[in-house]
Amino acid sequence: MTSIEDTGSASPLATLWLSPRQTIERIVSSRPTYLVLPLAVLGMIAGLYVELVSFGLADGLLADGRLADGLGGWRLWLGFLLGGAVIGVIWLYLSSAILTWVGMLLGGEASPRQLRAVIAWSTVPIILGALIAFVVGLALDASSAAASQWLPWLAIAFSLWSQLVFLLMLGRVERFGFMRTILAYVFNVVFSMIFALLLSLPIRILLYQPFNVPSRAMTPTLLEGDYFLASKLAFGYSRFSLPLLLPLPTRHILGAEPQRGDIVVFRLPKNLRTDFVKRVVGLPGEHIQMKDGALYINDVAVKREPLPDYVGRDPCGSAATATAKRWRETLPNGVSYETLDCVTNGFFDDTPVYTVPAGHYFMLGDNRDNSADSRALSAVGYVPFENLVGRADLIFFSRAPAEHGAPAMVRRERIGTVVR
């Protein structure tokens, strides 16, 4: 005679590991909303953290065996937790809606409430995996060689366990066999990606578009490896607001002219598929000139004060660290920012007078000796208003590139920095 263990009174948190189908059956038949929302939120936060671990980015949240501290660390943690919570709630209801529709197509029997229970409870393994990775990251340096070798595999293992639990629970509540369960899973993934794309496109086109900085032309304001959001609202909308370069009119809708000192993203006039980021210094009709490294606007020198030398990753060469002359420049409208001067009597330190055409703007990089900008008429030149894409507003991530044997490191202190 075979005995069957009675798990009726055991906690679902304990039984789902080896009996996920029986566990979800018991949950949906008695309390289908039990811990669903908290588990969905924790599951999304855990999933995001596991993704960071898998890609070796966990050192942005953990450093030297402790929580990331300072203002950058505080902003990073707050944004990570709040963002994960919001996405978790949206993901719960959107996924259950998609699964309900897929279930109707395939002859499933589960209600949206039951499917939300499946989605939430299947995250328990990944929550445990993220907790283990987090504790290990506190005990060790998350970027150490030992942690970097096995933590990603641990994260992947718990992620796969969660997926297996999800499939077993989904098949049980829908009363599906193996093939219909796999088909429902595939449909869910495909339609989730389509909905995510449809939701993100309006934000990217109308509000904010992410960009990254691949060079040192805007050092020290924007560093190589910075990721920032550019506001589309700042200058209105044109064909350059779309992800694809379509043959549409270039005239801006709801356009607003940039202010002197704005850091803007624009399409390179010589190559409309290339995005540049520079600072606006010259407005239509003005005369711009560089004399002995100083900026002149309409024959008047822009106020410039010397600062202590810049010391850091070489802004003008390939050395790991270097120094460069640093200045604080203040434009006529009061906008103030730092510039670098790597070379005395550099190629663009003395230029002819540039007269900015109507409807165009003159752009400069803050790293004056290592920037291709409007001073190079054959490469960049004057930038038409219709080529403006957006205004750089906020750095949302920053990672110093790996070079000279040094590992790539997250710059926690720059995350959440307003671009000025």
Image (tube, rainbow, N blue to C red):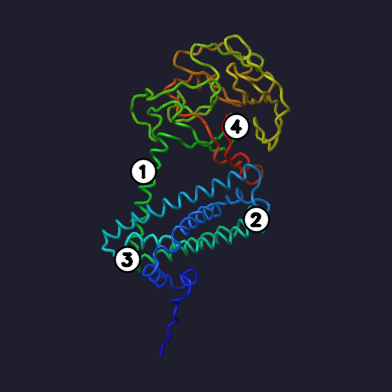
Kindly identify which residue carries mark 3.
Answer: 174
Looking at the rendered structure, the secondary structure element under dot 1 is helix
Question: Toward the viewer: 218 or 251?
Answer: 251
Mark sitting earlier along the chain (1/2): 2
Mark 4 vs mark 1: give the one in front.
1
- In percent of width and height, residue 269 lies at 45, 23
Residue on which disc 4 sits: 216
Q: Quadrant of residue 235?
A: top left
Quadrant of the rendering where the C terminus is positioned: top right
For disc 1, the neighbor class at 10 Å (few under 14, some 14 to 19, many from 20) is: few
Q: Nearer the viewer, mark 4 or mark 3?
A: 3
**Mark with earlier residue (4, 2):** 2
In the picture, the disc for residue 198 is 1
Out of 406 and 143, give the one closest to the viewer: 143
Question: What amino acid is found at the position of numbered circle 1 in the picture?
Answer: Leu
Callout 4: 10 Å neighbours few (<14), some, many (20+)?
many
* Separation of residues labelled 2 and 3 (CA atoms): 45 Å
The mark that comes first in sequence, 3 or 1, is 3
Q: Are marks 4 and 2 in contact (CB under 8 Å)?
A: no
Indicate the amino acid at tag 4.
Arg
In the rendered image, residue 227, in percent from the top left (x then y), is placed at: 54, 38
Q: Which residue is mark 2?
A: 145
Could you tell me the amino acid type at mark 3?
Answer: Glu
